[in-house]
């Protein structure tokens, strides 16, 4: 095995990030937004395959917790009286739900909304299912389309009207302690999920005024787009306490005969996970998919020369069989276009490894592996080389993760100086962590003066969820009012 | 290995078929229709698992045709002008579509309907994708929810308002010949699918006045409910010819530069496939799932006796491990309820094999296998017995199929006597095949006089699709007007 260095460019990717992103989704055949309805896209074959693999990881994680989550499927249409039951919840969503008012040519007696999320569909059913503590816990999830009548600018996979891929998990417990433990399990599942995808993230507790409508508190996973340093929320975990239980009268009979309200949690991840995969690992030439979820892990491009066609094709097929039998998702491109066009096509689509096989290679009994992430060229022996490919795929997976982590860490800044905060946000160098008190006024002042938004409290500063929490050491002064505080907050621009 | 005969009862299943069916769906935890909206159900964990396995078979078949079908996902909402484009299609669906007319508190500029089927969503996209013959064929499918504002009585999994599981495949071809070949591939896929599920079916061409709105012709798969002998349509394959192509202006440039209309097909299967699985193989005690798709293939019930608890449980776990390592989906029920209750529970849920392990069995170094389909008890040796279970599961799969086939064949009658036809339909003994001419009047007369409906022409009498077709031999006289005809038609009651 011998290797040569390669080169990749990230200029366009860096400087025109949103253009690059919108562009590549169609070019790489992930999703086509040219359907005649704003914010609604068509998942193409290749994109659907990627989506399936990404969400299969999430399914596997949910199905295999000590008490498994059960995959289920609840109705899409919510009768108005049900949807309107939980006041806080309604306030959070009523401006953005779609209403079905007609069936055929008939006006409906009761209007139906398209689920923006499924609390008000699921919880009346939970009421039928729960009688005693023996019916608890309930842990279900579904992966469905949800709908939001967005009036803001829509963005591919990020802000859409039909959210085609919303994984929502909902759990019900006998005690507050169990619900809190469930929140921790939710955090763990999502951490594992994004680790598997090679996506860096930070976890924070949302400000109280920005939590999920109907939750006691909300915790969010965010990633940072490497190009423009904006944050993207890619997952949320909510402790609902007994708020919905009281609205939907969800009670159970405890061991001692007492009737008690249940405690609930819910947590969600959407197709933004795909947006994160696409944006974290690309470059100017297109996608660069983590081998773990790449629909095709290795593409074989035979370099056909006249007189050698048959031999080269035969050896290519040979290699394909070897790789498939090793469990590698390999494909041979023997189509009628030029090798150059093939390179371009599969680079755009982010296939992690390209294999070249030309007349010289046949002579030397070798083939060339080109890494999509680095451009590095590795020469492998024809007979034994295929066996080395799983290792190379693993390395690519690891390197992509490392590279993305470094980029993210570089765009997290920390300061306790108000002017520096202002400056950092202005110059769009990343997110900034600052000491802040709990007064809404202080938060508001920052949001008014900078383009940044209060994103949340890094989990490190939250006693219940942090291993690093320190009552003694965490003594700060609010960056705005200088009052003592135990907390820091993240300020940044976000999608 | 020694075996004892068992007994099963099919009285209720036979005589109160629809009651049995509605009942068992909830008891076996397949789907819960108690949601506060007519015709909308909740797939429970166990049912969802069954549904996943059934549709995975269909996915595998579609993904692995010589030119694979690509799984995709298209938007749910259809803008009114798009939906209204194809006149025949609109006529077929306009009375039963749901309309979204409001977003938040705002009236929408353009009303949106919930897809009843996706021709009008997909074909405008196809127009963007097709330029030359090199872009053909297109073969895509999606598995989605569709919506029908049913005004008739709804029935679980059979006639619903949210059809949660609609697999629709759509293909585009350069020539009429290729489209016809595609229809044949569709028929083949569906035949294999239902064979794998052990569901008997017959294939027929729908009468011209009852074809899919916008199709040149429609072919349907039907099964017969063994209890009440009504037919259920469980799949359709349509040749759309150039009808939609002309409406949506779908053209391609041929090799010689000529611009031509494309030829299209579409074919669908819904959650009625699950209704068929449930209804074909049950009995009075509940479901009897084909091992191929059963979420749990074997349930181990330890028969706990005092003093022996530890040993029995240990051996049960031992057996569970053995079975899992053989790839059997086995589960141990070590819950706190009585063995009798466990038997009842897992019989209801249709687990194909129950394994009993009590103190006597431990002594004799054996365990008992009870077949769900026949009640037969088989004693197996503890050490080597697990290896025989895959074979028993195969036998159950085969026997279920055979038994269902015989039941179906017994309820297909044939006559050329009008009074006998009337009698057979009246007595509800099954479907009846009769010679019939092409005059609508003759069909109408039958439908007026009997409770039966013209279902279609058995595929045997259709030249293009039949290996048995015989121009020479097929000479009949219409059962109504006595005119010569080459055709027979199926008359029956249907859901």
Image (tube, coloured by chain):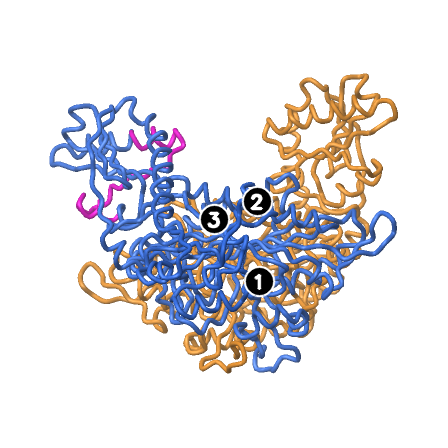
Chain colours: A orange, B blue
Of tags 1 and 3, which is closer to the observer? 1
Of tags 2 and 3, which is closer to the observer? 2
Is the same chain shared between marks 2 and 1?
A: yes
Q: Is residue A397 magenta?
A: no
Is residue A53 visible to the viewer in this orientation of the structure?
no
User: Mark 2 or 1 closer to N-term?
Assistant: 1
How crowded pointer 1 is (Cα within 10 Å; few <14, some 14-19, many 20+) is rated as some
Q: Secondary structure at mark 1?
A: helix
Q: CA distance from mark 2 to mark 3?
A: 72 Å
**The N terminus of chain B sits in image quarter:** top left
Res A174 → quadrant: bottom left
Is the same chain shared between marks 2 and 3?
A: no
How crowded pointer 2 is (Cα within 10 Å; few <14, some 14-19, many 20+) is rated as few
Label 1 lies in what chain? B
Is B236 rendered above or below residue B6? below
Q: Which mark is residue B208?
A: 1
Task: Identify which residue is drawn at 32% across, 39% down.
Answer: B331
- Residue B287 coordinates in the image, percent (x, y): 31, 49
Task: Identify which residue is drawn at 78% across, 37% down.
Answer: A335
- Residue B82 coordinates in the image, percent (x, y): 67, 70
Is B195 rendered above or below residue A211? above
Is residue A107 visible to the viewer in this orientation of the structure?
yes
**The residue stretch that appears in magenta:** B319-345
**Is the residue under label 3 in contact with that under label 1 (CB below 8 Å)?**
no
Q: Which residue is mark 3?
A: A188
């Amino acid at each position: 095995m011998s290797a040569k260095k390669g080169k990749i460019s990230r200029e366009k990717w860096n400087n025109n990030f949103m253009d690059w992103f919108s562009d590549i989704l169609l070019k790489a055949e992930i999703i086509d937004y040219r359907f005649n309805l704003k914010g609604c896209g068509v998942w193409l074959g290749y994109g659907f395959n990627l989506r399936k693999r990404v969400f299969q990881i999430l399914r596997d994680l949910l199905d295999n917790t000590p008490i498994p989550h059960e995959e289920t499927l609840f109705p899409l249409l919510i009768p108005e009286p049900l949807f309107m039951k939980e006041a806080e919840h309604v306030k959070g969503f009523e401006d953005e739900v779609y209403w079905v008012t007609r069936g055929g040519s008939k006006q409906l007696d009761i209007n139906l909304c398209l689920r923006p999320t499924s609390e008000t569909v699921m919880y009346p059913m939970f009421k039928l299912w729960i009688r005693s503590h023996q019916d608890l816990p309930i842990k279900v999830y579904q992966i469905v389309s949800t709908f939001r009548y967005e009036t803001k600018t829509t963005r591919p996979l990020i802000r859409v009207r039909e959210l085609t891929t919303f994984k929502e998990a909902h759990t019900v417990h006998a005690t507050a302690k169990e619900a809190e433990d469930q929140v921790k399990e939710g955090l763990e599942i999502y951490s594992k999920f994004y680790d598997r995808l090679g996506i860096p993230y930070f976890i924070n507790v949302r400000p109280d005024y920005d939590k999920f409508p109907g939750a006691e508190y909300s915790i969010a996973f965010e990633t940072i787009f490497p190009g423009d340093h904006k944050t993207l929320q890619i997952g949320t975990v909510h402790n609902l306490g007994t708020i919905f239980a009281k609205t939907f009268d969800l009670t159970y009979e405890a061991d001692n005969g007492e009737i008690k309200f249940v405690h609930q949690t819910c947590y969600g991840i959407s197709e933004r996970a795909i947006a994160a995969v696409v944006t974290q690992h690309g470059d100017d030439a297109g996608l660069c998919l983590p081998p773990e979820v790449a629909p095709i892990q290795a593409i074989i491009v035979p370099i056909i020369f006249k007189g050698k066609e048959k031999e080269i094709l035969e050896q290519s097929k040979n290699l394909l069989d070897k790789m498939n039998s090793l469990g590698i998702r390999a494909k041979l491109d023997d189509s009628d276009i030029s090798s150059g066009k093939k390179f371009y096509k599969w680079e755009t689509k982010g296939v992690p490894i390209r294999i070249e096989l030309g007349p010289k290679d046949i002579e030397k009994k070798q083939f060339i592996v080109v890494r999509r992430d680095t451009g590095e060229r590795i020469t492998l022996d024809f007979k034994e080389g295929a066996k080395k490919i799983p290792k190379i795929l693993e390395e690519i997976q690891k390197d992509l993760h490392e590279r993305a982590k470094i980029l993210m860490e570089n765009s997290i800044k920390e300061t306790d100086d108000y002017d520096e905060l202002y400056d950092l946000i202005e110059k769009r160098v990343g997110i900034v962590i600052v000491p802040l008190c709990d007064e809404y006024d202080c938060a508001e002042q920052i949001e008014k003066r900078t383009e940044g938004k209060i994103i949340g409290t890094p989990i490190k500063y939250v006693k219940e969820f942090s291993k690093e929490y320190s009552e003694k050491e965490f003594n700060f002064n609010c960056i705005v009012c200088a009052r003592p505080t135990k907390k820091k907050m993240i300020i940044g621009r976000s999608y």
